Image (cartoon, rainbow, N blue to C red):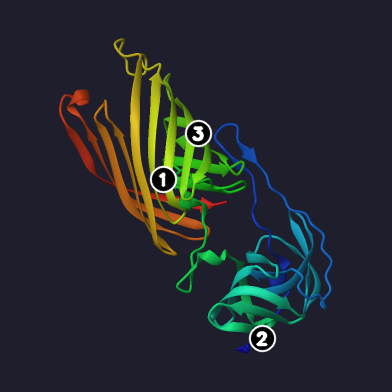
Amino acid sequence: MTHAGFSLTFVYSPESMKSIVHRKYSALSFAFALFFNFTLSQEITFSPSDTLSFYHIITLKDGTVLKGKIMMQERQTIQFQDEMIGNLTFRTKNVSSMEKVEPQEHYLITMMNGTALHGKIINRKENEITVETANLGIVYVDMNKIKTIKNITAGNMKDGKYWFKTDVDAHYFVQPCAIPIGSGSAYFQNTMALYNSFHVGITSNFSCVGGVILPVAAFISPHANFKIAQNVHAGLGIIAADITGSPYAGAAYGQVTFGNRNAHVSFTGGYGVLEGITDYYYTTKITSIEVGVISISAVKRFSPKYALITENWITPSEGIAILTGGLRLLGEKNSWDFGIANVSISHHITGKDISIGPISFLSFMRNL
């Protein structure tokens, strides 16, 4: 049995107590017709002598750490009972993190001195928790030395590092894969300030993407995804877009994804129509375009913070190919894609073969 001890000087600043945590489940809206709003309200009693009872660890942006229970949480304020300070009421804007801790679940525990422990919390007393770790055995941790606690899936620990979950794991440069992001999950994407979209999980198997491509189009794309075997998911979806001028476009597609959230490859086939382009292109010879599209895309996460990504589109009948590849920098909240693209167009369309590239681009994504 291993016994570990830590120390902490708790500094209380009345100014820092003016704000506290509230996870931001806020309104998400598509360019047209999709809007969600999440609010939290709960009442919890607390006794310092409780054992094996859940509690909260809250870290403020100035580094102050509170440990206790939420008595009342509303949209603008939160009432909190800290084990050392007592009852406090604060506004909700200056919080770094909040974690609800429940015994028997797995957690990543970061201490004030930077030490990290991961394991199952098997007991809790007034000022101490007992952690069952894989490498150190049973460790007794003083509550006053803990900086943050994060609930994790035991399988997300690899070689002592925490491979955090992020919604963009199920996303390529533009399209999502067939692995569902889950009900209530959502992220925003901006690419070169031109492509802006929201992806929102509505149920465990149904989600929707919508947004605008400045300055020419707005679109919406609902899709359904299902697990059909171990590490195999299938999806179906449609896309509807309105383009500046008179054209409008629609497409339907099917998709199969092989792999898990950290490493997967997707094969997509779709068929689309662009209508009403006579006036738009100032010609009477073309009224619509119909085209079939094939896509092959993949992601490989090789460390907690980095992944390789590729997304490739081909129109066999028209001779258009868009090939992309790049690096993804992952964060629990914000992620970045650094990509390079090459576009080739067959002489069947332009009268001669054209290749454009390499074209560099940058995308920003934020979990909501």
**Nearest to N terminus: mark 2 or mark 3:** 2
**Residue placed furthest toward the top:** 284
Q: Disc 2 versus disc 3: distance between alpha carbons?
A: 52 Å
Q: Please state which amino acid type lies under the numbered disc 3.
A: Ser
Task: From the viewer's side, name the closer residue of 26 and 311.
Answer: 311
Image coordinates of residue 225 in percent, x first then y, are 52, 40
Task: From the viewer's side, name the closer residue of 349 and 313.
Answer: 313
Q: Which residue is mark 3?
A: 221
Left or right of residue 132: residue 15: right
Secondary structure found at label 2: loop
Q: Which residue is mark 2?
A: 9
Secondary structure found at label 3: strand
Image coordinates of residue 104 in percent, x first then y, are 68, 70
Residues marked 1 and 2 touching at CB (< 8 Å): no
Image coordinates of residue 170 in percent, x first then y, are 47, 49
Tell me which corner region of the image, top left, top right, bottom left or bottom right, holds residue 126.
Answer: bottom right
Task: From the viewer's side, name the closer residue of 75 and 127.
Answer: 127
Q: Please state which amino acid type lies under the numbered disc 2.
A: Thr
What residue is drawn where x is 74% and y is 68%? 54
Q: Residues within 10 Å of mark 1 (few under 14, many from 20)?
A: some
Secondary structure found at label 1: strand
